[in-house]
Amino acid sequence: MAADTTQLEGLRILVAEDEGLIALELETVLQGFGCEVIGPVSRVAEVLREAERGNLDGALLDVNLRGEQIFAILRQLIALDLKIVITSGYDDATLFPPEFRSLPRLAKPLDEHALRAMCESTFLPR
C-alpha cells in the first residue's frame, strides 16, 4: 500500500510554543504531514513578527508564551488573515476572552490524528 499522502504537503505553518519538548514534537509531526515549519518561536513578539512577514498558511499558537498571553496580539493576527489554531493545556473555552472562544482549539497533550484533522479543516482552502 502506498504511503499516506497528505493534503498538508508544502503548507507553511508557524509554531509558537515555549516548552522545548512540545515544540520539537509539533515540529516533527507537522514535518511528517509534509508541512514546512516556521519557528518554533517562544515569544509573542516573534509570533507577530513572523505573521507580519507573511507567506504563512497557518499558525499553531500556545496561549501562554513565556508568561505572555497570545490574546494580546490575536486581533492583529486575525486582521492579517492568518488562520489560527490555539493550543492550550486548558480545554475550557470559558478561560479565553469571549471574542476568541470560537477559534479552532486543541488541548495538550496533542493527539497526532486530531492535529492532522484540525490542520486540514483550518489551514486548507475551502
Image: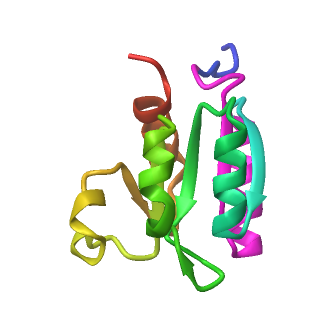
Q: Residue at the location (21% across, 65% down)? A: 98
Question: Split into 4 quadrants, where in the image is the N terminus?
Answer: top right
Along the line of sight, which residue is nearer the eye, 78 or 35?
78
Q: Is residue 57 above or below residue 75?
A: above
Q: Residue at the location (49% across, 31% down)? A: 123
Q: Residue at the location (70% across, 76% down)? A: 19
Position of residue 47 in the picture relative to residue 91 (left or right): right
Along the line of sight, which residue is nearer the eye, 66 or 31?
66
Place of residue 15 in the rendered image (x, y in percent of width and height, measured from the top left): 67, 53
**Residue farthest to the bottom?**
67
Along the line of sight, which residue is nearer the eye, 84 or 45?
45
Chain part drawn in magenta: 7-32
Q: Residue at the location (30% across, 71% down)? A: 96
Number of numbered labels in the structure image: 0
Along the line of sight, which residue is nearer the eye, 39 or 111?
39
Q: Indicate yes or no whether the magenta region holds residue 22.
A: yes
Place of residue 89 in the rendered image (x, y in percent of width and height, measured from the top left): 45, 75
Place of residue 120 in the rendered image (x, y in percent of width and height, measured from the top left): 47, 30
Place of residue 113 in the rendered image (x, y in percent of width and height, measured from the top left): 49, 44
Position of residue 78 in the picture relative to residue 20 (left or right): left
User: In which image quadrant can residue 13 be found?
Assistant: top right
Question: Split into 4 quadrants, where in the image is the C terminus?
Answer: top left
Position of residue 113 in the picture relative to residue 65 (left or right): left
Specify how the rendered protein is coloured.
Answer: rainbow
Q: Indicate yes or no whether the magenta region holds residue 92.
A: no
Q: Is residue 5 above or below residue 50?
A: above
Q: Is residue 45 above or below residue 126?
A: below
Position of residue 62 in the picture relative to residue 100 (left or right): right
